[in-house]
Image (tube, grey):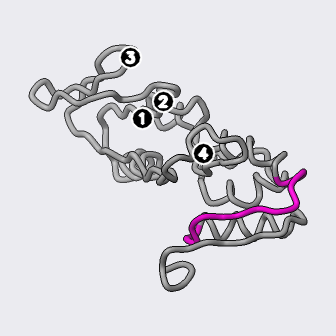
Amino acid sequence: MAGVQTAVQLREQGWPGGITLVGAEPHRPYDRPPLSKAVLLGRAPGSAFDVDFGALEVDLRLGTAVTGLRTGDREADTAAGPVPYDGLVVATGAEPIPLPGAEGVPGVYLLRTLDDAERLRPVLAGRREVVVVGAGWIGAEFATAAREAGCRVTVVEAADQPLA
């Protein structure tokens, strides 16, 4: 979201230079909040931003992870080769915190990406009991979606209250 908004604002404010938007996911940039409800419940197929990157002359490189920066050379490294830059905006977003010992355990899921939401949709359709670890915005939205899907939900939160 931050990368897309930065590119749009640069163009709206008259930036004439090249803009390259690099993203590790294969999907067009999308808004994450709908993932935890609308996408999970099948009310929306996705949440891609309605942005015409061609008209904005933004070089969109999807499925390309930046693996490092060489600031002296002013280049971002990717598996597809270096991407030169004059100015750089790092808009990587947040990473979910995996629970120790949960990696690869059947029935344990993370929710951050469109692919994560797609994997969770059938889980909600078939489960009757769901435990949500974390009562931030994503956890609270997921818990609401799970209840709407007919699941029994328990929310576990380390903070004193939800949405702390």
Residue at (61, 37) in percent of width and height: 104
Looking at the picture, how far across and down is residue 157, in whole percent? 56, 74
Alpha-carbon neighbours of circle 4 within 10 Å: few (<14), some, or many (≥20)?
A: some
Q: Nearer the viewer, mark 1 or mark 3?
A: 3
Three-letter code for the amino acid on which mark 2 is drawn: Leu
Q: Name the residue under label 1.
A: 21
Query: Of callouts 2 and 4, which one flags the residue occurring earlier in the amino acid sequence?
Result: 2
Type of residue at label 1?
A: Leu
The residue shown at (78%, 65%) is: 145
Q: Name the residue under label 3.
A: 79
Residue at the farthest bottom position: 160
The single residue placed furthest to the front in the displayed view is: 101
Helix or strand or loop: what does disc 3 sit on?
loop
Q: Disc 3 vs disc 2: which is toward the camera?
A: 3
In the rendered structure, find residue 113 and report the number of the disc placed on it.
4
Mark 2, secondary structure of its residue: strand
Specify start and end residues of the magenta stretch as a single range.
124-137
Disc 3 crowd rating (10 Å Cα; few below 14, some 14-19, many 20+) is: few
In the image, residue 160 sits, relative to residue 130, either above or below, namely below
Q: Quadrant of residue 141?
A: bottom right
Residue flagged by tag 4: what amino acid is it?
A: Thr
